[in-house]
Image (tube, grey):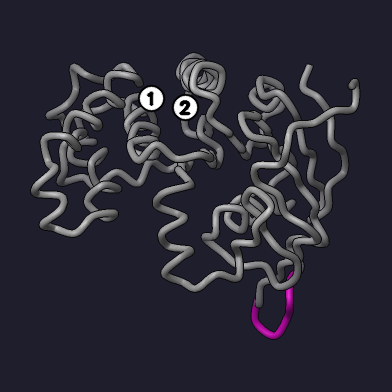
């Protein structure tokens, strides 16, 4: 039983990805295999330029591999029709980035509601608007910002904006949260608060989290580390 691992939730096989820079092809991923179990918290760590963010984008269907495949619950998803991939990004994946990407003209509540506005038709959203506002309010309360509902991003601190981004990512109740340098723009104390929030979501709600970071102290707070170097997996290890 020591080697037992739960069934794969999200996995990728032999991912290879290059980008064109002028006349040259620049390889970024070079045959990456990764397997994440449901409810697992995994950090992808490595130096800048090693392929961490590209791997995250391919896993979340924001980009497509040149070679290899991405599987959800064993089913291939990277080759599905564009409309189906769009739906998966809205329903299955939640995204949190280093830069918060909040819309400056909207309040915190309105920003958190945007994924629901995208998911549903205008008529369906209008009919269910109270239900959706309650769901957004619940998620905002979960991240500790219920006192900031009507504030715009310019009125929030960096930590509050990242909490708002996390609430927005989770309002559709995704299965997998993909976090790309979620503490990168924050001071140590605020970054620690964001990590405490992510660990709580993972432990209490069983949310599968895949986090990219270059910070070893942040990476060590996950359950497992995937170390990348020059587009290849250098090691897989349990966090300390």
Q: Position of residue 82 (x, y in %)?
A: 46, 72
Q: Residue at x 80, y 61 (%)?
A: 14
Q: Residues within 10 Å of mark 2 (few under 14, many from 20)?
A: some
Q: Are marks 1 and 2 in contact (CB under 8 Å)?
A: yes
Looking at the image, tell me whether mark 1 or mark 2 is earlier in sequence order: 1
Residue 20 lies in quadrant: bottom right
Q: Position of residue 190 (x, y in %)?
A: 45, 18
In this view of the protein, which residue sits in the foreground, 228 or 34? 34
Q: Is residue 217 left or right of residue 168?
A: right
Q: Residues within 10 Å of mark 1 (few under 14, many from 20)?
A: many
Query: Mark 1: which secondary structure?
Result: helix
Asked if the magenta segment contains residue 150, the reply would be: no
Q: Is residue 139 left or right of residue 151?
A: right
Q: Is residue 139 above or below residue 82?
A: above
Residue bearing the label numbered 2: 186
Q: Magenta region, mostly helix, strand or loop?
A: strand
Q: Residue at x 75, y 66 (%)?
A: 68
Residue bearing the label numbered 1: 159
What segment is highlighted magenta in the picture?
Answer: 21-26
Q: Position of residue 44 (x, y in %)?
A: 70, 39
Q: Is residue 69 above or below residue 53?
A: below
The disc at residue 9 is none
Give the alpha-carbon distance from disc 1 to disc 2, as whole Å: 7 Å
Q: Residue at x 32, y 31 (%)?
A: 164
Q: Is residue 108 left or right of residue 70?
A: left
Q: Residue furthest bottom?
A: 23
- Tell me the quarter of the image containing the N terminus: top right
Asked if the magenta segment contains residue 22, the reply would be: yes
Q: Residue at x 39, y 35 (%)?
A: 170
């Amino acid at each position: 039983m020591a080697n037992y691992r739960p069934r794969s939730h999200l996995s990728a096989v032999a991912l290879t990805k290059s980008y064109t820079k002028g006349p040259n092809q620049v390889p970024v991923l070079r045959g990456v295999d990764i397997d994440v179990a449901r409810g697992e918290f995994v950090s992808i760590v490595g130096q800048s330029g090693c392929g961490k963010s590209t791997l995250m984008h391919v896993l979340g269907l924001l980009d497509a591999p040149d070679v290899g495949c991405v599987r959800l619950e064993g089913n291939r998803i990277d080759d599905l029709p564009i409309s189906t991939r769009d739906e998966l990004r809205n329903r299955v994946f939640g995204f949190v980035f280093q830069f918060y990407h909040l819309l400056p003209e909207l309040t915190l509540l309105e920003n958190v509601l945007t994924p629901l506005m995208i998911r549903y038709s205008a008529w369906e959203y209008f009919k269910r608007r109270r239900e959706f506002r309650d769901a957004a309010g619940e998620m905002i309360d979960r991240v500790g910002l219920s006192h900031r509902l009507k504030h715009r991003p310019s009125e929030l601190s960096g930590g509050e904006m990242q909490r708002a981004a996390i609430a927005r990512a989770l309002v559709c109740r995704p299965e997998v949260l993909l976090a790309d340098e979620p503490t990168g723009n924050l001071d140590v104390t605020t970054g620690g608060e964001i990590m405490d929030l992510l660990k709580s979501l993972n432990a209490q709600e069983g949310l599968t989290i895949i986090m990219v970071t270059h910070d070893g102290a942040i990476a060590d707070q996950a359950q497992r580390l995937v170390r990348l170097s020059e587009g290849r997996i250098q090691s897989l290890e349990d966090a300390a």
